[in-house]
Each structure stands twice: as C-alpha cells, then as structure tokens.
Amino acid sequence: MAKKKNKVVNTSGKRKTAIARATVKAGKGRVRVNSEPIQILQPELSRRKAMEPLVIAEAMNRLAKVDINIATHGGGIMGQSDAIRTAIARGLVHYNGGAEGLDEDLRDEYLRFDRSLLVNDPRRKEPKHQLGRGARKKKQKSYR
C-alpha cells in the first residue's frame, strides 16, 4: 500500500523591508501569524488587509480545509500585513492548482482585485543625499 503524500506549499511575500513566509498544507482551516491566530492580529486595519485573499478565496469556494502558518519579520505593521497577504494569496493559488501548478481562476480574480496580492511591491526607500536632510530636501542656496 502506497502512502498518500500530503501536499505542502511554501511561499513568501515582501513589502519594503518586511518579509513573510507562508506554509500551506491540508488541515482544519487555521491561519496563524507568528504562531497566533490571524483573528487577533492588531490593529484591525492590518488584520482586514491581511485577510483579503482569504475572503476572496472563500467567495469563490476555493478555500479548502487548509492550515496556513506565516512567519513574518522586519519592517513595520502595515509592511508586514502587505507581505502576509501576498504570501497567503500566492500559497492558495499554488495549493489549489493541482498537477498543472496554478489555479488560473483564483489567480485572475486576485489580479483583478489588486495586483500586489501576487506581485511583490518593488518600491524601496530612496537613500539620503549630501547637502540635505533627506532624499529630496536640500539646503537653500542664495547667489546674492
């Protein structure tokens, strides 16, 4: 008797300096962020943003009984929540894909809703330059 191998999908998401790594596997439907349920993630705006891919997948009946474990570090609260939502969305697209690899319907719905659900945001902080306090602000010059 051959033992059936359970499917496990590892994905990641990035935003600024925040990185989230997600593991999607068959289970009871639990979603945990840093070993805590996503339902107690604070602040509420961050929680709602992180749960967007779950709401969309549930509306399309694509949210199977899966456990999603997310480890996140770096960045701030909103950067981490954006990284979390990218990792969850990528994980669900790959997990529901089956043998062909990707769930095209779910992928198209995520892209229609918000492209950053599946694509990392490439924007980064611009470095400070000389003659000023920041990246753009400069000391005033007078030629009189």
Image (cartoon, rainbow, N blue to C red):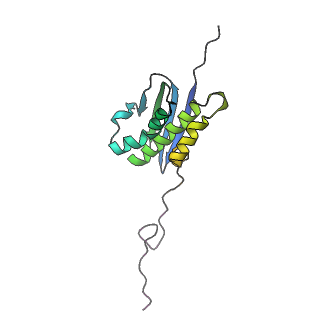
Query: Which residue is depicted at the point 33% across and 42% down?
Result: 44
> Residue 74: which quarter of the image?
top left
Q: Is residue 2 left or right of residue 89?
A: right
Residue 1, above or below 11: above
Q: Is residue 76 visible?
A: no
Instruction: Give the prevailing secondary structure in the magenta stretch.
Output: loop
Q: Is residue 108 left or right of residue 56?
A: right
Query: Which residue is depicted at the point 65% across and 11% down?
Result: 2
Query: Which residue is depicted at the point 50% across and 26% down?
Result: 64
Q: Give how far across and how far down residue 122 sits, in percent.
A: 54, 53
Q: Is residue 115 visible?
A: yes
Q: Give how far across and how far down residue 28 sits, in percent.
A: 45, 22
Q: Is residue 101 left or right of residue 89?
A: right
Magenta stretch contains residue 86: no
How many numbered marks have been drawn onto this rendered protein structure? 0
Q: Quadrant of the C terminus?
A: bottom left
Residue 73, above or below 96: below
Please provide the residue range marked out in magenta.
Answer: 125-144
Query: Which residue is depicted at the point 40% across and 30% down?
Result: 35
Q: Give how far across and how far down residue 3 sits, in percent.
A: 61, 12
